[in-house]
Image: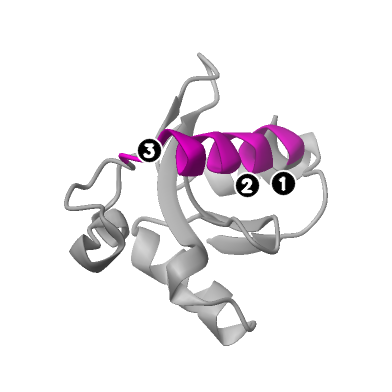
């Protein structure tokens, strides 16, 4: 299940979005709007939900959150964007990583 999250998620919501991957949450962050989608099996699904809600592709970055350890990763196929200077699944820009991490901490942690 993919959910659009625009304000701090409660514990029930976190459990629900973590069900798909047994405690790991895939997320896609809109770094401009400071919102995200969480849950599901593919980042693509969260990306599509954000695009349908008016987000711009250039502002969307994917990653994951391990609920048990609290570790955030910045790995997703949707991050491969050579035209934006990101030729890797990992978010290479420290500035974008920091923006993604801030939104994840505000809304999911």
Compared with 96, 42 (above or below) is below
Q: Name the residue at 55% across, 19% down.
A: 70
Earlier in the chain: of badge 1 and badge 3, it is 1
Residues marked 2 and 1 touching at CB (< 8 Å) = yes
Q: Position of residue 75 (x, y in %)?
A: 30, 41
> In this orientation, does residue 25 appear?
no
Report if residue 48 lies within the magenta region. no
Span of residues in magenta? 92-106
Mark nearest the camera among 3 and 2 is 3
Element type at mark 1: helix
Q: Position of residue 96 (x, y in %)?
A: 48, 44
Label number found at residue 50: none
Judge by depth and name the residue closer to the eye, 83 or 26: 83
Q: Name the residue at 52% across, 77% down.
A: 56
Judge by depth and name the residue closer to the eye, 75 or 24: 75
Q: Circle 3 is placed at which residue position?
A: 74
Earlier in the chain: of badge 3 and badge 2, it is 2
Q: Circle 1 is placed at which residue position?
A: 13
Q: In which quadrant of the rendered view does residue 34 lie?
A: bottom right
Q: Circle 2 is placed at which residue position?
A: 16
């Amino acid at each position: 299940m993919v959910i659009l999250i625009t304000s701090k998620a409660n514990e029930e919501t976190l459990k629900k979005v973590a069900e798909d991957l047994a405690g790991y949450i895939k997320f896609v962050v809109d770094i401009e709007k400071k919102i995200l989608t969480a849950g599901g099996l593919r980042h693509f699904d969260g990306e599509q939900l954000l695009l349908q809600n008016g987000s711009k592709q250039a502002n969307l970055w994917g990653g994951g959150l391990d609920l048990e350890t609290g570790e955030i990763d910045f790995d997703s196929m949707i991050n491969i964007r050579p035209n934006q200077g990101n030729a890797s699944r990992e978010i290479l820009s420290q500035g974008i990583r920091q923006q993604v991490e801030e939104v994840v901490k505000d809304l999911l942690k």
